[in-house]
Amino acid sequence: MMRYITREQDGFTLIETMVAMVIFTIGILALFGMQTAAIKENLAANNITTGATLASDRVEQLIALNYDDTEISEGGAGISQYASCDDLSSDNWWRTLSATQRVKEDFLGETANHPDYFVYWAVSKGCTLVKEGGIGLDDDSPYRPKHLHITVTRDNGSGDEEVTAAFSYIKQNPNY
């Protein structure tokens, strides 16, 4: 018995195959786009984690010091003078304070693929427990807590620094 193929069926499987290939190609291209976005977000997460690690390391070192340690005392080894509370209320305090009021530590990347991180920290005193109406501590009281401000920035490749982590801590005088 002979089979006859009608003209309406010619090329039908070829068109189906081409449509399937187009759909498959679009799906593969979408996967490439998602992969690129995932890599970008992983890099951002790595930058934030590195910044937070550097900041928390510096916080732990400063918190472990005695209240009267020269590194966190005015005229000491770390800072020459306390920063004012108003100066440290700005988000960009690390740019505006003088070198006598803040410390800058460099963590330079080994290659171009490892960015440079910078840890800035400053100490202020007298931001809390302000004396009002006879209650609180005098401005020159040795028992006023010290405020530790730590900011980590990262060189974004264009010579500008972007903040990756920022912490503020209060170091209480244990004799108070």
Image: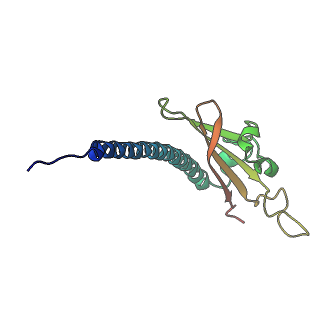
- Above or below for 26 versus 160: below
- Left or right: residue 40 versus residue 153 is left
Residue 104, quarter of the rendered image? top right
Q: Nearer the viewer, residue 69 or 117?
A: 117
* Outermost residue toward the right in this view: 133
- Left or right: residue 83 versus residue 170 is right
Q: Residue at x 38, y 46 (%)?
A: 23
Position of residue 16 measured from the top left corner of the image (x, y, whole percent): 32, 46
Position of residue 101 measured from the top left corner of the image (x, y, whole percent): 74, 41
Q: Is residue 78 visible?
A: yes
Q: Nearer the viewer, residue 22 or 60?
A: 22
- Left or right: residue 45 versus residue 164 is left
Q: How is the image coloured?
A: rainbow
Residue 22, quarter of the rendered image? top left
Q: Is residue 97 visible?
A: no
Residue 74, quarter of the rendered image? top right
* Outermost residue toward the left in this view: 1
Q: Nearer the viewer, residue 69 or 32?
A: 32
Q: Nearer the viewer, residue 71 or 50?
A: 50
Q: Residue at x 49, y 35 (%)?
A: 114
Position of residue 7 measured from the top left corner of the image (x, y, whole percent): 27, 44
Pick the quarter of the image with the C terminus: bottom right
Q: Residue at x 63, y 55 (%)?
A: 66
Q: How many marks?
A: 0
- Above or below for 144 versus 19: below
- Above or below for 120 versus 89: above
Position of residue 153 measured from the top left corner of the image (x, y, whole percent): 62, 41
